[in-house]
Amino acid sequence: MVTDILKIISTRATSQRLRARKDQVENSAGGYTFAIDDEARLRRFLTLGVEGGTYYAQPRELAAENAEIVMQLAETNPRLLVDIIVEVSVAGRAPRANPALFALAIAASFADDAGRTYALEKLPQVARTGTHLFIFIGYVRQFRSWGRGLRRAVADWYLNQSADKLAYQLVKYRQREGWTHRDLLRLAHPTGMDAAHGDLFAWAVSKGTGDTAGLPSIVGAYTQAQALGAAGAEADFVRLISENPGMPWETLPDVALTMTGVWEALIHAGLPQTALLRQLPRLTRLGLTGGDTGKLIARQLADPVRLHGARVHPMSVLVALRTYANGKGVRGDSKWTPERQVLDALDAAFYAAYGGVEPTGKRLLLALDVSGSMTAPISGMPLSAREATAAMALVTAATEPDYEVVAFTATQPLYAKKSASLFGGCAISKLDISPRMRLDDVLRKTDNLPFGGTDCALPMLWAAKAKVPVDTFIVYTDNETWAGDIHPYQALRQYRDQLGIPAKLVVVATTATSFSIADPSDAGMLDVAGFDSAVPNLIGDFIRGQ
Ligand code: CA
């Protein structure tokens, strides 16, 4: 039999290992996907970070690639760069502040005069805490020397907040990355301030030994706590906290942080939400998560006002939940027995962190990539992309009336394709998860799923073959896919033709690479980055066609 070699060339069904169109690029796994533009790439970097690298790229390579994109934008469109940094940062869309501070440092170093000035003007919006400021200074010194503009921006950071707010920053975030407020005040040398600021600066430069008379009361509370030191009694610390309800726990000496009464006082005074999330193991060990204080903690944890006020990222809640449910610290040096009401509150807090998500009412098929590459951690957090993905799928599940969740795995396949190039081929299976299950159980379940080959075209192929009506396919993937004899965008077109439904495809990217299986020239396809609180509504708006 003579085979016609020309039959392998097709623009309607092309192997994912071949380039189907000129605008496709090879991904790190050897498959062909589309490349996203620089703006989309920037958003992925800002919201997803690079600390964990990807399965295929080391963190250093990924960092270098992303830094290059940011530098390019600093030169070509600094205003756009800075505006996106501010938008992502102010909206709390990233679980960590570092990428935004890093990108702003690049803008403040590589843009033209007007661009650098614009970047530095926005410093207080992106560096909202003393720690942010220190991290920014560390980054900016990687790219430039001190100059008048930078000194003035730092001086303004200190001058343009009220004395009370600044005092809080000075006692709460005292040093980081080898920098102290004393260092920065001496370098920036702010002038033209009022007496209140002048006295605070003098106190900060005195290394905290100066007179606190006339300063905001929180400074006196801090120096008193430090003076009590290791010899301080619980009653003394508790009294200090009740007299100064806004005093941060960071102002207390180590000994105070081992005392039950001290934490009880801090909680009743209104411990900030991020501190509360991080201190749950300690609060449980101290016996505070049961009883009335436990009820108060549970209420505070799931309080939407507290969550949004503190810009708590849903993934930070997820990390807190997973860590807490484990009952032991990552180094195994501390143990606690997870309290049910805390676990339930964290579960509720995760959904609450996403805020109000409006259902679209459309028919949705969610497909989760759970392949080996999805075990890469996101944003340097102890959380894998597959876990974050499963959790976020539940946000859709909790909102939408009509959805199905499948995963790319070969156990009890709904639909499978044998492939000569793959062990056992690729398949999708129904994933039995629902928001009625608690998140820590879902995470465990997802983490134990057997890896399968990932062919992101399968959801469309299956739905076409089984004649399942779907308005929108939502695929969560790192886009490092190569398996399959038809590209996902081609499979979507076939599905539309065969079922007569103008189906859409949303691709939720889980790593800060430049690849996407979504066709950028098809208005029915959307590429979104990450897991932040804005994503469900972005997807919803797209599905509704807004
Ligand atoms: Ca993969």
Image (spheres, rainbow, N blue to C red):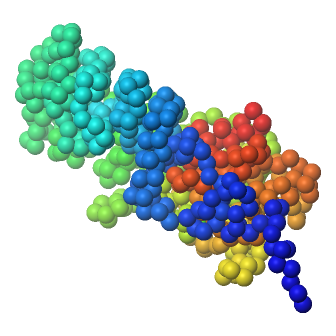
Looking at the figure, which quarter contains the N terminus? bottom right
Q: Residue sitting at 19 percent across and 14 percent down?
A: 191
Which image quadrant for residue 30?
Answer: bottom right
User: Is there any visible trace of residue 56 in the rendered image?
Assistant: yes
For image coordinates 44% across by 47% down, the residue present is 68
Q: Quadrant of residue 242?
A: top left
User: In the depicted view, which residue is nearer to us: 448 or 286?
Assistant: 448
Q: Residue at x 76, y 42 (%)?
A: 523
Residue 232 is left or right of residue 429, and the answer is left
Q: Is residue 342 above or below residue 58?
A: above
Give the image location of residue 483, x and y in percent.
Answer: 68, 70
* Percent of width and height locating residue 285: 32, 53
The residue shown at (19%, 43%) is 178
Above or below, 92 against 442 in this view is: above
- Screen quadrant of the C terminus: top right
The image shows a total of numbered marks equal to: 0
Q: Note whether residue 335 is visible.
A: no
Is residue 290 or residue 425 the one in the foreground?
Answer: 425
Say which quarter of the image contains residue 351. Answer: top right
Q: Position of residue 517 (x, y in %)?
A: 68, 56
Residue at the bottom extreme?
Answer: 1
Relative to residue 109, is residue 219 drawn left or right? left
Q: Nearer the viewer, residue 404 or 482?
A: 482
Residue 519 shown left or right of residue 174 in the figure: right
Measured as percent of width and height from the top left, residue 339 is found at: 44, 53
| Relative height, residue 192 to residue 149 (above, below) | above
Is 506 situated left or right of 188 in this image? right
